[in-house]
Amino acid sequence: MKIRSSFFIDFNILDENLSKLKFLAPNNKIIFMIKANAYGHGMVRIVKFAVEQLGITEFGCATIDEAKILRRVLPKHIFDIYVFSDVQINTKSSSEFYLNSRTLPVISSLEDLEYILDDHDFRHMPLCLKFNTGMNRLGIELEQQDEVIKLLKHHDKKEIYHLFSHFSSASLSVKKKRPREQYDNFLELKQNLKSSSIEIKYSSMANSGAIEQQFSLDETHVRPGLMLYGPSALLNPNITTTPWSGKLIGRLETYILKTFEVKRGTPVGYGGTIAHDDGMVAVLALGYGDGISTEFQGKKLQYLNHAGTVLGRVNMDMLQLFFPRSQNCPLRAGDRFLMWGHDPEYFRNLCQQLKMIPYELLCQLTVRVPRMY
């Protein structure tokens, strides 16, 4: 059976993107962020390729369940996993998983730190701490650092294996006040820990936006996510100055289910949206059941250098694309239709039309769209 709508992932482009990343951050180790099913690209296959072909051995996910999937499906592959958000450290099953699976919980609260230090089974677990330097999301508060130091000394802990924090505004210019203040707070935190005889083996703060701007690269690691999948993490107007030249590793293709002519004033689809001109309608085999949201209504899509407009509501399984008769667009049922390809500019323009960030558009693709590698 021929597969129709598909998300094609090109590992060669991922390899090229990694080389471009290393040019920007040549002295840093990499924690490859693969949360949310590798930003919609298929976590297991991305990690497998990255370990076997790219030599990446450290990955970051959001939840312990993501880590469990990787360990279950790739039991013979050697790599470290950091769990950044939903660590669930204080349950027996989670504790056993961390202790036996080369998976590291990133501790973001004083309560979780106390728990892990008081548990004798965790005495040899590398300690990963995340501090809130101004993002005000997850993270141990800077005001609690004296309590942290006291706890570490009480439990005879002399090293933090990896010290983390996260920028709130790296998608904007790092020349602005907030990123600078956050990094200054991080550097001061590091100095306070070291002055208290707490060694820091590894540290990282730079996400994709910071890496693109080559900011905070004096730490041992960087944590690229979006940029390795292709798009820039910067927002307008800063994106115009980015040195990032990555390409999208995935292209989303579908096909035309049906074409038909319409006269101006003809109602089409749910709600009877009226065609504003004479033209042709192409019905595409993608809908919100595939992750194409109703935000696509009224937006422009390109087909063979012709601009079509999504007419009416997006359906669960399909959408209608209208082309004015004046374009004389050669539409045929059964033809392939490229929703987006490897061109980052086209994808960026599509995101701007939709008023979405690239993360949203990529992550909302559902499992109904097969990933083809």
Image (cartoon, grey):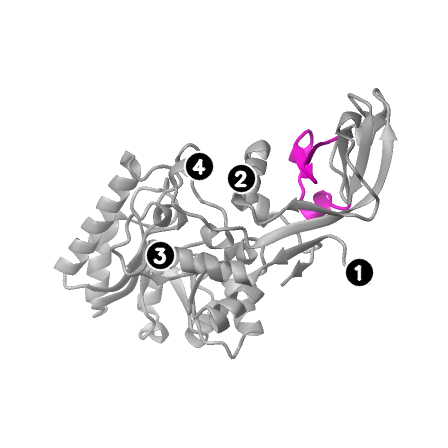
The question of residue 134 being in magenta is answered with: no
Q: Amino acid at mark 4?
A: Leu
Residue ID for mark 3: 23
Residue 136 bears which disc, if any?
A: none
Q: Amino acid at mark 1?
A: Lys
Tell which tag, 4 or 2, sits nearer the viewer: 2
In three-dimensional space, the C-alpha distance between marks 3 and 2, rounded to whole angstroms, equals 23 Å
Dot 4: within a 10 Å radius of its alpha carbon, few (fewer than 14), some, or many (20 or more) residues?
Answer: some
Residue, x 57% and y 66% (percent of image)? 45
Q: Which residue in the protein does label 2 denote?
A: 348
Q: Are marks 4 and 2 in contact (CB under 8 Å)?
A: no
Dot 3: few (<14), some (14–19), or many (≥20) neighbours within 10 Å? few
Q: Quadrant of the C terminus?
A: bottom right
159 is higher (above) or lower (below) than 39: below
The residue under label 2 is which amino acid type? Arg
Chain part drawn in magenta: 285-311
